[in-house]
Structure formats: structure tokens, C-alpha cells
Image (cartoon, grey):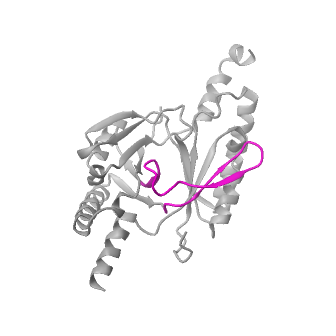
């Protein structure tokens, strides 16, 4: 990773929408409380600035001209995104430390940690090409 | 279902822009920029974020495992997102169909922002069925 890039925050992507299926009612209540406390704590400290769960039933658009519209993603997928959190912390290490505390991990949820980019890769690539051309 | 009229539009792809010749790159960048800026100006989209291609995955039911990911070549990686305002999932998907980057193999995932975490929604369902919950 490029250490000289400016810090634009980090995104936690929660993957796996099925992890709570096997839980007992009691376990679900516990996880729910822990998650709420974790989320509220992060928002209160300013380490998190936004976060949302996502409805399971979505759409996938693909193909030239976006011709193909299908239902998705599959709820059983371990990769399906269940929600996200936007973090405002000083380093990747801090973001990962927060991710490690996610209560869902104990039940098989996976957390992806991604630094927010300064700008869209496509636009960045275009301006790099332009710079190279004028060099 | 969620009462919110906000939808996450996820940009899912590999780094297809690294393969394009410069002229084509400039063209699609201009088209994509115009498409997004138009949506933002009309109040349909809110600028989201691009994400750095590298990151980590946190998993592990007992103890935490950190692995590198997603891989830059992956077609499944989330490259960025914007938030859309729309009256329905179908309408949000229709907006997504206009993305000029789709012809390069990108897929768009459209997910409604939920009112309540699905875990909590399920919990409420179970709590309202005392006979089933006790089983």
C-alpha cells in the first residue's frame, strides 16, 4: 500500500448475511446488544462517522449498456455484504483493531477493511496518463 | 422492508482501467464523470467514496485472523460506491444501468439501506413467537 497517500478514512464492509441463522434467541439478543454498544461507542468517540445495514434483497446490473438486471446477491453467500461502517481513524492498524472487535466475528461474520481512496481509480489513472503524456 | 428511499450503489470490478489504451481511458473517464455529476446535480446521487484496492480481511470465531485481501485482480472486489435516492429498488437499478463503465465488465450491486439491522428484525420476529422461540 502507498504510505504517502493522504488518509481519507477507512471502510469496514461486513460480509456474510447468514451468520446469525444458527443462533439461539438468547445468543441473538446478546450479539444485538453487543453490536449496538460497539456501534454507538464508535459513533460517540467520532471513530465512526456513518454506518448502515443493507436490505438483503438487491439487484445486480451487468452487461454492455447494463442490459442484464438480476436479483442478487445470494443471501447464503459468505461474501454477501450485510452492511458497512465508515471510520475516521489515523491508520490502517487502528481500523483493523476496531474491526477485530466486531461482535459478529465470533459467529462467522467476516470484516473487510479498506482504506478510502483519495479519488476514483479511473480518474486517477486518466490523470496519470495525462501527466505521462506531457512529461 | 426498509422505509428508507436510499440505495447503496456498489461498483464491483477488477482493475479493468489498467488495460485500456489512453484514448479510450480518457473517453470512458469523461463519460463516467459526466454520468455521476449529472446524478449528483439532480440530487439523485450523493458522492460516495472510491476504495483503495488493497485491504485486509478480519475473520475468526476464536481469536482473529488477518489476511490480505481483496486481490486487485478480483472481479468481485468493491471499487467504490455512491448513494442513490430512488422510489424503489427497480428504479435504483434502472439508474445504475446508465453507468458507462458497465461495458468493461463492471457489475453494479444495488442494495437498499435498511431501517433495522436484519439481525434485529429477525430477533423481533422470534420474540413475537414465544411458542416457537422456546422450542
Q: How many marks?
A: 0
Give residue B108's position: percent from left, percent from top: 37, 46
| Front residue of B129 and A7 | A7
Residue at image point 65% right, 21% down:
B128
Q: In what quadrant of the picture does the C terminus of chain B appear? A: top right
Give residue A1's position: percent from left, percent from top: 55, 69
B61 in the magenta segment: yes
Residue B17 appears in which quarter of the rendering? bottom left
Give the residues in magenta: B52-81
Left or right, residue A55 beside residue A31? left
Does residue A4 lie above or below A123 as drawn?
below
Q: Residue furthest bottom?
A: A135
Residue at image point 37% right, 70% down:
A124
Give residue A57's position: percent from left, percent from top: 45, 33
Give residue B74's position: percent from left, percent from top: 46, 51
B51 in the magenta segment: no
| Front residue of A111 and A87 | A111
| Front residue of A113 and A84 | A113
Amino acid at each position: 500500500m502507498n504510505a504517502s497517500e493522504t488518509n481519507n478514512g477507512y471502510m469496514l464492509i461486513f460480509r456474510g448475511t447468514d451468520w446469525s441463522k444458527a443462533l439461539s434467541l438468547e445468543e441473538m439478543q446478546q450479539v444485538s446488544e453487543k453490536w449496538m454498544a460497539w456501534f454507538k461507542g464508535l459513533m460517540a468517540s467520532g471513530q465512526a462517522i456513518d454506518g448502515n445495514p443493507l436490505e438483503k434483497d438487491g439487484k445486480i446490473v451487468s452487461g454492455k449498456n447494463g442490459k442484464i438486471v438480476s436479483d442478487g446477491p445470494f443471501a447464503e453467500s459468505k461474501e454477501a455484504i450485510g452492511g458497512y461502517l465508515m471510520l475516521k481513524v489515523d491508520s490502517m492498524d487502528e481500523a483493523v483493531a476496531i474491526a477485530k472487535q466486531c461482535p459478529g466475528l465470533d459467529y462467522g461474520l467476516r470484516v473487510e477493511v479498506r482504506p478510502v481512496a483519495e479519488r476514483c481509480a479511473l480518474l486517477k489513472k486518466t490523470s496519470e496518463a495525462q501527466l505521462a503524456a506531457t512529461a | 422492508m426498509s422505509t428508507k428511499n436510499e440505495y447503496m450503489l456498489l461498483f464491483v470490478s477488477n482493475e479493468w482501467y489498467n488495460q485500456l489504451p489512453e484514448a479510450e481511458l480518457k473517453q470512458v473517464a469523461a463519460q463516467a464523470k459526466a454520468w455521476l455529476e449529472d446524478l449528483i446535480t439532480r440530487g439523485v446521487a450523493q458522492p460516495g467514496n472510491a476504495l483503495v484496492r488493497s485491504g485486509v480481511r478480519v475473520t475468526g470465531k476464536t481469536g482473529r485472523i488477518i489476511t490480505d485481501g481483496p486481490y486487485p485482480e478480483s472481479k468481485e472486489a468493491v471499487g467504490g460506491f455512491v448513494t442513490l435516492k430512488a422510489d424503489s429498488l427497480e428504479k435504483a437499478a434502472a439508474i445504475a444501468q446508465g453507468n458507462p463503465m458497465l461495458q468493461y465488465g463492471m457489475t453494479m450491486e444495488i442494495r437498499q439501506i435498511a431501517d433495522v439491522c436484519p439481525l434485529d428484525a429477525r430477533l423481533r420476529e422470534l420474540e413475537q413467537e414465544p411458542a416457537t422461540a422456546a422450542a
